Amino acid sequence: MFGKSSHISRSVRPLALGAAVAAVLLLAACTPVAGAPAPVAPSEATVPASANDTDLHFLAMMTPHHEQAVQMSDIVLAADEVTQQTRDIAERIRAGQQHEIDVMLGWVADWQQEPLLEQHSTHIANGMVTPERMDALAALGGADVERTFLEEMIFHHEGAIAMTQDQIDNGGYAELRELAQQMIDVQTAEVAEMTQLLGR
């Protein structure tokens, strides 16, 4: 038996050695190293099966949309000589939309969609106010800031309502569609209230 092994050709020995080395390398690659971080699953794997592109786009667009509404409310609430009626609705908008932001950011984190949120974070669409108009609002006071806030927020809400209706019609994730319907109900009522405050 030992005598036969000595007759193995020189061409076969390198091949056998190479295969053994490859097997060792493959085993090492598949074996977790102590203390090494676990591999991160692709972000798509964290998204619920029922969620679709409409849901992800809505989260990425509506979150900064809401954040701007909070900023606009902060501006009018910091101004002097604003009527209590306008302060009341600004406070409700700020509190309600901040709560919805927190809910949406929870899904963004759970579904690992931070890159998509970042991609849309600077978009100005669906009734959002340009930076120049935000600066102009912040520079006003008294009746001027109140009137401009109400006008801009009506426009802001109307853009949000249109975008939210698309989520209700085409979104796949039931809980997000329910939140979207709540947004429409609240913002439609707020538009009517702000229109009345403007005396239209």
Image (cartoon, rainbow, N blue to C red):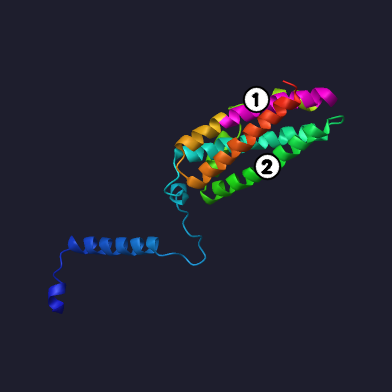
Residue 159 on the magenta segment: yes
Locate the C terminus by quadrant.
top right
Q: Position of residue 90 (x, y in %)?
A: 74, 35
Would you say 125 lies left or right of 21 here?
A: right
Locate the N terminus by quadrant.
bottom left
Residue at 16% of width from left, 78% of height from top?
2
Give the labeled residue for mark 2: 96
> Given contact means CB atoms under 8 Å apart, are the residues at marks 1 and 2 in contact?
no
Q: At label 1, which amino acid type do we have?
A: Phe
Q: Position of residue 141 (x, y in %)?
A: 84, 26
Q: Position of residue 133 (x, y in %)?
A: 71, 23
Q: Position of residue 131 (x, y in %)?
A: 69, 26
The quadrant holding residue 5 is: bottom left
Residue at 79% of width from left, 33% of height from top?
85
For marks 1 and 2, the one nearer the N-term is: 2
Residue at 78% of width from left, 28% of height from top?
138
Q: Is disc 2 surrounded by few (<14), some (14 to 19) or many (20+) residues within 10 Å?
A: some
Secondary element at tag 2 = helix
Whole-number angstrom distance, CA of label 1 to CA of label 2: 18 Å
Q: At label 2, which amino acid type do we have?
A: Gly
Q: Which residues are magenta?
A: 139-161
Secondary element at tag 1 = helix
Residue 74 visible in rendering: yes
